[in-house]
Image (cartoon, helix red, strand yellow):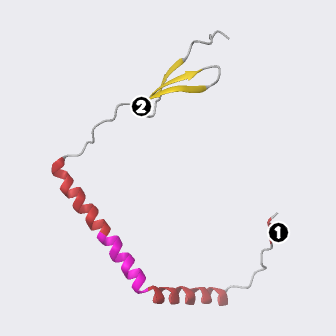
Amino acid sequence: MGIKDSENLKVTCPCCQAKLTVDPILGAVLSHEAPPKAEPNIDLEKAHDILAEQKRQREDKFADSFFQETHKEDILAKKFEEAMKKAKDGPAGKPVRDFDLD
């Protein structure tokens, strides 16, 4: 090959713009220099709106979870009824054995 032992490759990652030093013979990364972090692109005037939206989403999730928990018995009963209807309507199939899966 035309590459000497002392020649390391300097590579820039196309994804994150990090700078890597790679040994071409071993194929190993010798050093990594992280790209400079960009400052967040958030306007402080919009931050209040963002926080309010996140609070609303949390409250909605909590309300949904609370509803699900308080009506758990009704939901499970309906699911059971549907499963029983399916079982009665459909023919009983041959059970799958572990041997059949091989």
Q: Which residue is pictured at 20% across the width and 57% down the height?
A: 49
Residue at x 62%, y 85% (from the top left corner)? 86
Say left or right for 73 vs 40: right
Q: Is residue 41 magenta?
A: no
Q: Determine contact: label 2, label 1, CB under 8 Å.
A: no
As rendered, which of 18 and 50 lies closer to the eye? 18
- Whether residue 15 is situated above or below residue 98 in the rendered picture: above
**98 or 10, nearer to the observer:** 10
Please name the residue that numbered disc 2 is placed on.
34
Residue 100, label in figure: 1
Residue at horizontal 55 percent and vertical 16 percent from the top = 8
Span highlighted in magenta in the image: 59-71
Q: Which residue is more in the foreground, 54 or 82?
A: 54
Q: Is residue 61 magenta?
A: yes
Callout 1 environment at 10 Å: few (<14), some (14 to 19), or many (20+)?
A: few
Instruction: List x then y, in percent, for residue 75.
Output: 47, 86
Q: Amino acid at mark 1?
A: Asp
Counting residues from the start of the chain, the first of labels 2 and 1 encountered is 2
At x 77%, y 78%, the residue is 95
**Amino acid on which the number 2 mark rests in the picture:** Ala
Which quadrant of the figure has residue 64?
bottom left
Q: Is residue 13 above or below residue 84?
A: above
Name the side, left or right, on which 95 lies relative to 79.
right
In terms of secondary structure, where does tag 1 sit? helix
> What is the distance, in whole Å, between disc 2 and disc 1 at their CAs?
52 Å
